Image: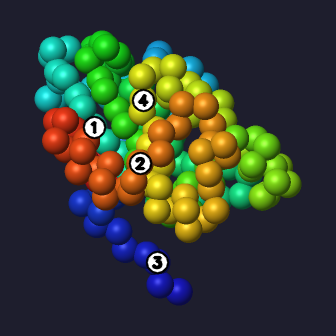
């Protein structure tokens, strides 16, 4: 019977891995302080901390519909961004966000009546989108996607804007100083 042979170096590596594991597993993700109930983030010890004087103008892009009765993860990214920056010392007034919605994600900005008619359930994104709008997030739907999917202005949640197209919305937002968040 052969006994496993473990070198002292290998044993040290295994021990170190075991000791470090709790540091990675123990991160607690919580919501707030800007968008309560949405956008959970973890506090991070930064090596490049923000000063609190930063100003952000960022557009996010969503083309995929949320899965089943779940909120659209891309929409929740905006809540995460707001919460992360606030925890890092950036005031919400220094953040301007926009969400350009196209493709299947257009169904996720339907009001409950239109959503119920299409999917026989309430829109799981209603409260999240209202919370984002409360924090000055613009929500812009691609008119071309809307037309293709049979979505009219009357079908949209309050405050959702209808653009000529997602391409047009992105071009105009860039001219206004917004940068595109690739995630």
Q: Which residue is mark 4?
A: 137
Q: How many marks?
A: 4
Few, some or many C-alpha atoms within 10 Å of disc 4 (few <14, some 14-19, many ≥20)?
many
Q: Where residue 126 appears, x then y in whole percent?
A: 66, 35
* Residue 41 shows in the view: no
The one of 153 and 73 positioned closer to us in this rendering: 153
User: Spatial distance from mark 4 to mark 2, Cα to Cα?
Assistant: 15 Å
Q: Where residue 43 appears, x then y in whole percent?
A: 38, 26
Horizontally, is 152 left or right of 50 in the view? right
Q: Nearer the N terminus, badge 3 or badge 2? A: 3
User: Spatial distance from mark 3 to mark 4, Cα to Cα?
Assistant: 63 Å
Q: What SS does tag 3 mark?
A: loop
Up-down relation of residue 171 to residue 126 (above or below): below
Up-down relation of residue 165 to residue 172 (above or below): below
Few, some or many C-alpha atoms within 10 Å of disc 1 (few <14, some 14-19, many ≥20)?
many
Q: Nearer the N terminus, badge 4 or badge 2? A: 4
Q: Which residue is mark 2?
A: 163
Q: What SS does tag 2 mark?
A: strand
Q: Verify CB contact (< 8 Å) between mark 4 and mark 2.
A: no
Q: Where residue 119 appears, x then y in whole percent?
A: 79, 57
Q: Which residue is mark 1?
A: 58
Between marks 3 and 4 in the image, the one whose residue lies nearer the viewer = 4
Identify the residue at image location x=47%, y=84%: 2
């Amino acid at each position: 019977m052969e006994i496993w042979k473990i070198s002292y170096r290998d044993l040290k590596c295994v021990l170190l891995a075991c000791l470090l594991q709790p540091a990675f597993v123990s991160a607690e993700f919580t919501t707030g302080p800007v968008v309560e109930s949405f956008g959970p983030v973890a506090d991070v010890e930064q090596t490049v901390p923000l000063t609190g004087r930063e100003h952000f103008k960022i557009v996010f892009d969503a083309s995929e519909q949320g899965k089943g009765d779940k909120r659209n993860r891309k929409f929740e990214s905006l809540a995460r961004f707001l919460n992360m920056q606030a925890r890092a010392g950036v005031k919400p007034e220094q953040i301007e966000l926009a969400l350009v919605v196209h493709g299947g994600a257009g169904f996720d900005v339907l009001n409950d009546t239109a959503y119920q008619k299409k999917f026989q359930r309430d829109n799981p994104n209603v409260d999240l989108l209202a919370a984002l709008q409360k924090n000055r997030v613009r929500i812009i739907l691609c008119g071309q996607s809307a037309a293709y999917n049979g979505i009219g202005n009357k079908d949209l949640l309050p405050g959702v804007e209808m653009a000529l197209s997602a391409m047009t919305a992105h071009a105009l937002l860039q001219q206004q100083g917004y940068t595109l968040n690739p995630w």
